[in-house]
Amino acid sequence: MDFLTHQALSRILPPDAYAFVQTNILHPQSQFQLLLKQSTVVATNAVSAALPYLDPLIERVSDALHDNSGAVGVVVALGVITAVVMIMNWIRRLMMWWARFTMVLAFYAAIVVVLAIAWERGPARSLRDVVVVASKIVGYLASLREVWVQEYDRYESQGNPRTRR
């Protein structure tokens, strides 16, 4: 194992996890390393056995690509564009999932907070608080309506040519 891997793992992992990784995964005589070596040998043998049969096919594909280099450029460009669009769609879906997840969590957290406040203060005081907050909201909306009506009347009194018939 090289020095950088040793330093990175020893700083990231807790000591017991680092010892586990060192003995069971990174040690040259561990089962994982033996399985990795055996898999590499099997894959190398499979490729070397299949290469004589695949060599003519690879040669024909290479010649076809060389003869149609313009079409290859278009196909590669379309492939890159398709890959970019797919990745951007995945990113969009992931962001929408996280946004929806956080909104659901915030909604349930608000419900828990309201229930905790109602539990702490009791039903009578909580109901009185709800009535006070609702009356303040209604008063704010009434003043907002007054401002809107005044601005609308001022707009109409200016003689806007679109409103005249």
Image (cartoon, rainbow, N blue to C red):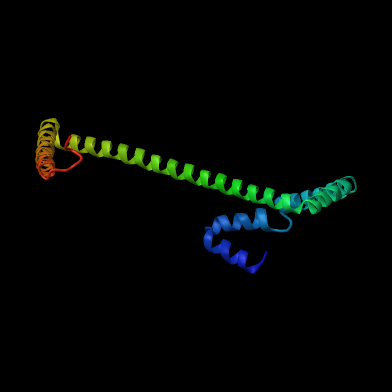
Q: Quadrant of the C terminus?
A: top left
Q: Nearer the viewer, residue 72 or 35?
A: 72
Q: Quadrant of the N terminus?
A: bottom right
Q: Nearer the viewer, residue 29 or 109?
A: 109
The answer to whether residue 41 is visible is no
The residue most toward the bottom is 3
The residue most toward the right is 52
- Whether residue 39 sits left or right of residue 151 in the image: it is right
Image coordinates for residue 8, horizontal then vertical, percent:
57, 64
Q: Measured along the vertical axis of the image, is residue 128 above or below residue 68?
A: above
Please tell me in which quadrant of the rendered image residue 160 appears. Answer: top left
Please tell me in which quadrant of the rendered image residue 53 appears. Answer: top right
- Whether residue 161 sits left or right of residue 12 in the image: it is left
Image coordinates for residue 112, horizontal then vertical, percent:
27, 37
Q: Residue at x 23, y 35 (%)?
A: 115
Image coordinates for residue 66, horizontal then vertical, percent:
80, 54
Q: Nearer the viewer, residue 148 or 153?
A: 153
- Whether residue 18 sits left or right of residue 2 in the image: it is left
Q: Measured along the vertical axis of the image, is residue 59 above or below residue 117?
A: below
The tally of labels here is: 0
The answer to whether residue 161 is visible is yes
